[in-house]
Amino acid sequence: MKAEIPGGAHHPCCLTEWRMGRFAEITNLQATEDNRSRVCASLTLPTCSGFAKLSRAHSPMATVVKGTAAAVRYTLDVRGNRDGVSTSHHTIFKISGTTVMFTSSSPPIISDGDQIVVAGTQRGKMLVALAYVNRTTMIRGDSGMWQSLLGAAFALSGGATALTLALPPFNIEPRFMLLAIGLIFSVMGLFLLYRWVTIRRAVNLLKGG
């Protein structure tokens, strides 16, 4: 870029002073750009790392325990009425001194002496297992990962439908009942989606185990 020399600055001394002034302006501009880059870097990098640390701090991490299963006990929980019945199988056992409880819709294949690897969340002195691998029988199981995903999809779609019908332009009566149903289904769907994410994380921890 060619800079024009101001009028009256054709004397050698004036020309030298003008060149020195231009050099100082360019130097200051470059220094300002360098400082701006340093400031942006100092603001951006800690923010990203801080966000990553915050995400890791708030994401629930599953606990993995492996060893020989002992003192295996089975309990059956049946709930419902004449319209429908739900059955839950609770399996309680010990691994390396840790009490483990695994709940599923079907009985798991776990017996005394089996080499077991479990992943779950610690609740007090008990580990609530969300997934397991039986290395003795080479069988895997989880606490209903796909059932939770299907339930979340159904609940969220039902909640969205109810809220859509209650709001403009439909305004279908009774609006308050539709709003309440939509909110309830939406909360249920979010809970089931969170459960699916938690179980999926436990299952992924045991891959290759």
Image: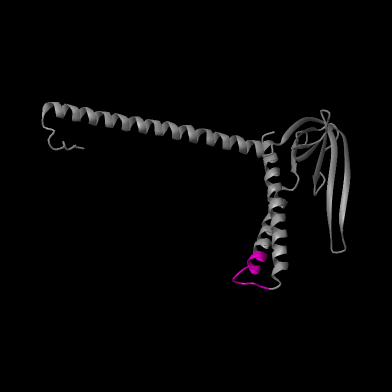
Q: Quadrant of the N terminus?
A: top left
Residue 136, position in %: x, y?
78, 33
Q: Quadrant of residue 69?
A: top right
In the depicted view, which residue is nearer to us: 23 or 41? 23
Residue 76, position in %: x, y?
88, 48
Q: Is residue 122 above or below residue 146?
A: above
Q: Quadrant of residue 160?
A: bottom right
Name which residue lies at 69% across and 59% down.
Answer: 154
Q: Residue furthest bottom?
A: 173
Name which residue lies at 84% across and 64% down.
Answer: 83
Name which residue lies at 45% across and 33% down.
Answer: 41
In the depicted view, which residue is nearer to us: 84 or 50? 50
| Left or right of 110 on screen, residue 43 | left
> Could one spot residue 109 in this view of the protein?
no
Residue 175, position in %: x, y?
69, 70
Residue 25, position in %: x, y?
27, 32
In the depicted view, which residue is nearer to us: 17 or 81? 17
Residue 165 drawn in magenta: yes
Total marks in image: 0
Q: Quadrant of residue 159?
A: bottom right
| Left or right of 2 on screen, residue 129 | right
Q: Residue furthest left?
A: 11
In the depicted view, which residue is nearer to us: 152 or 9? 9
> Could one spot residue 36 in this view of the protein?
yes
Name which residue lies at 17% across and 26% down.
Answer: 16
Q: Is residue 198 above or below residue 168?
A: above
Q: Quadrant of the C terminus?
A: top right
Residue 98 drawn in magenta: no
State how the image is colored.
one colour
- Magenta-tinted stretch: 161-172
